[in-house]
Image: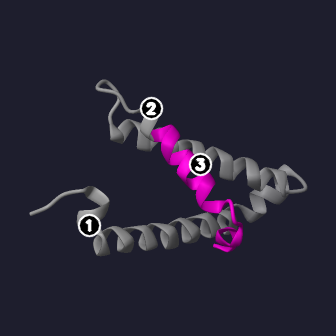
Amino acid sequence: MQSKKDPAFFERVDEHIKVSNDQMTPQVGVEEVNASMMYALARFNAWMTAHSSTSAEHMRVARAESIGHFVAQYQAMLEESLDAYINNYERYTQRTH
């Protein structure tokens, strides 16, 4: 997760979350917004892979490696975020028991 060294990393994260929050309505719930955000990320990751490849054949050969890379990155970020919510549940959700 080397991107976190970029000073604007969390500003971009917050902006993506703001867009997703703004998309939620009484008709469009968190599940639908989450699905579209995840699909957008998948498309962006595919574009990024294509952008750094020399050909479709190069992409095809590196396909499994690319998937493994993005899945590992996502898993690490999800684990970090879940731990943060577990450790700060009441504050992050503004719930009391």
Residue bearing mark 3: 41
Task: Please tell me which residue is depicted at 34% across the width and 40% down the height of the picture.
Answer: 30
Q: Quadrant of the C terminus?
A: bottom left
Q: Is residue 43 above or below residue 29?
A: below
Q: Secondary structure at mark 1?
A: helix
Q: Give the main secondary structure, helix, strand or loop, of the magenta stretch.
A: helix
Q: Which numbered disc, 1 or 3, marks the residue that appears first in the sequence?
A: 3
Q: Amino acid at mark 2?
A: Gln
Left or right: 2, with 78 as reference point = right
Residue reaching furthest to the top: 27
Task: Please tell me which residue is depicted at 58% across the width and 69% down the height of the picture.
Answer: 73
Q: Quadrant of residue 31?
A: top left
Front-most of residues 72 and 86:
86
Crowd band around label 1 with a 10 angstrom C-alpha radius: few (<14), some (14–19), many (20+): some
Q: Secondary structure at mark 3?
A: helix
Magenta-drawn segment: 1-20
Residue 55, horizontal then vertical, whole percent: 88, 52
Q: Which numbered disc, 1 or 2, marks the residue that appears first in the sequence?
A: 2
Q: Is residue 12 magenta?
A: yes
Q: Is residue 79 above or below residue 94?
A: below
Q: Quadrant of the N terminus?
A: bottom right
Front-most of residues 5 and 63:
5
Residue bearing mark 1: 89
Task: Please tell me which residue is depicted at 62% across the width and 52% down the height of the picture.
Answer: 12
Residue bearing mark 2: 23
Q: Amino acid at mark 3?
A: Leu
Q: Nearer the viewer, mark 1 or mark 3?
A: 1
Front-most of residues 30 and 39:
30
**Mark 2 vs mark 3, CA separation in Å:** 16 Å
